[in-house]
Image (cartoon, rainbow, N blue to C red):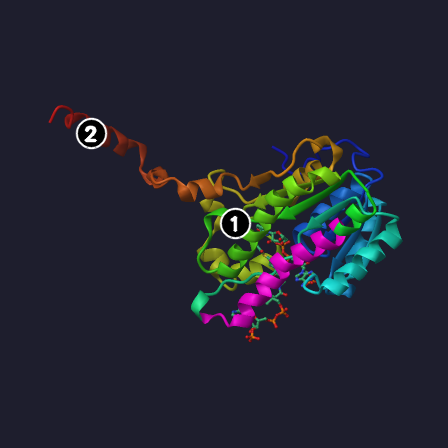
Amino acid sequence: MNFQAKMLRDDALKNKNIVVTGGGSGLGKAMTKYFLELGAQVAITSRNLEKLQTTVKELEEETGGKCFAIQCDVRLYEEVKQMRDEAIKQMGSVDILLNNAAGNFISPTERLSANAFDTIIDIVLKGSKNCTLAFGKHWIDQKETNKTVLNIVTTYAWTGSAYVVPSATAKAGVLAMTRSLAVEWAKYGIRFNAVAPGPFPTKGAWDRLLPGNLKEKFDLAQKVPLKRVGEHQELANLAAYLVSDFSAYVNGEVITIDGGEWLKGAGQFNLLEDIPSEMWDMLEEMIRKKKNK
Ligand code: HXC
Ligand code: NAP
């Protein structure tokens, strides 16, 4: 199977102007590339302007699309409003906000300072809130409709996860915000959805979640029923659909794209997968013998 195949037809995002937070690297960059290929204009934003400018150059050359680099720390509401105004100035308007920027690292929670916990909450939860408020208020004030916000969460937004507690706490908040505003702001013509990716290797995530030889020790592909990690294009296909008008009736949804990973961790008897087939004959016999005893 070709997991790199591109799903939507050419020009599916023509005349759409998109802001992607954290668009200079990793999954944000992959989604931006596909949006550009589909005819959208995209403004990518993060703290590191040089990185953004390099990405803009690379993606414009590769796709022939129009991409803009705007520096912004999503933790700071004033900067977010300036970023919004700059994106509107550069592109004319903004139709789609993709809240993708995040911070995360593994740590036993008792080792975290209060500031370390706050840092993750500030980037993930407050950052998504800042961007959502800045763009949402503008769209509502200007009576602009047919707008979409797509939030990137994780599957532990609903299960929680040890050792990434600030991230789990923040992503759970983003998920609640997604579902709440999908209802409240539908009357203004603004849709909200979320994507919950499983493992999609990126430098940003792997350096902080699987440092050193943890990559070899914990092969994440083995935790996935499909026995592989995700390809960036697979996520980009889903994101492009969710921000496009093809999904105009999808609102308040969170779509998991993880090869079945979280369910495998959840089902009580899923570990029986390790039992070899010859052993099942013996087990079946033992169980059948218990009948009527
Ligand atoms: C404990 C740590 C720490 C660590 C930082 N801190 N790293 N504490 N263990 N490994 C503490 C610092 O000491 C400080 O607290 C506070 O956290 C803030 O750290 P700074 O370095 O000053 O913050 P900042 O420069 O803003 O950097 C933010 C960051 C950094 C989150 C720490 O890693 C970053 O820039 N990340 C952005 C990219 C990223 O994280 N990408 C991965 C997303 S992956 P004190 O008290 O000392 O001041 C993801 C995947 C989810 O979300 C699901 C995967 C399956
Ligand atoms: P990444 O490359 O590290 O992306 C994170 C981005 O956020 C970076 O471009 C970073 O840019 C930006 N960012 C961080 N702090 C910021 C701030 N304060 N203001 C503005 N931008 C900021 O990691 P990734 O793996 O692609 O993650 C992308 C998204 O996918 C995140 O929401 C993550 O939680 C989610 N996710 C990833 C996986 C996975 O397996 N990779 C799984 C589930 C969910 P700067 O450093 O330049 O600011």
Measuring from the top left, give residue 26's x and y in whole percent. 66, 53
Within-10-Å neighbours for mark 1: few <14, some 14–19, many 20+: some
Mark 2 or mark 1, whichever is nearer to me? 1
Q: Give the residues in magenta.
A: 111-136
- Name which residue type carries label 2: Ile
What residue is disc 2 on? Answer: 287
Quarter containing the N terminus:
top right
Quarter containing the C terminus:
top left
Q: Does residue 63 show up magenta in the picture?
A: no
Please name whichever residue, 226 or 156, is drawn nearer the observer in this view of the structure: 156
Secondary-structure class at tag 1? helix
Measuring from the top left, give residue 49's x and y in whole percent. 78, 64
Name the quadrant containing residue 289. Answer: top left
Measuring from the top left, give residue 80's x and y in whole percent. 75, 60
Within-10-Å neighbours for mark 2: few <14, some 14–19, many 20+: few
* Labels 2 and 1: the sequence-earlier one: 1
Secondary-structure class at tag 2? helix
Query: Which numbered tag is attached to residue 108?
Result: none
Taking the image as drawn, is residue 70 in sight? no
What residue is disc 1 on? Answer: 157
- Name which residue type carries label 1: Ala
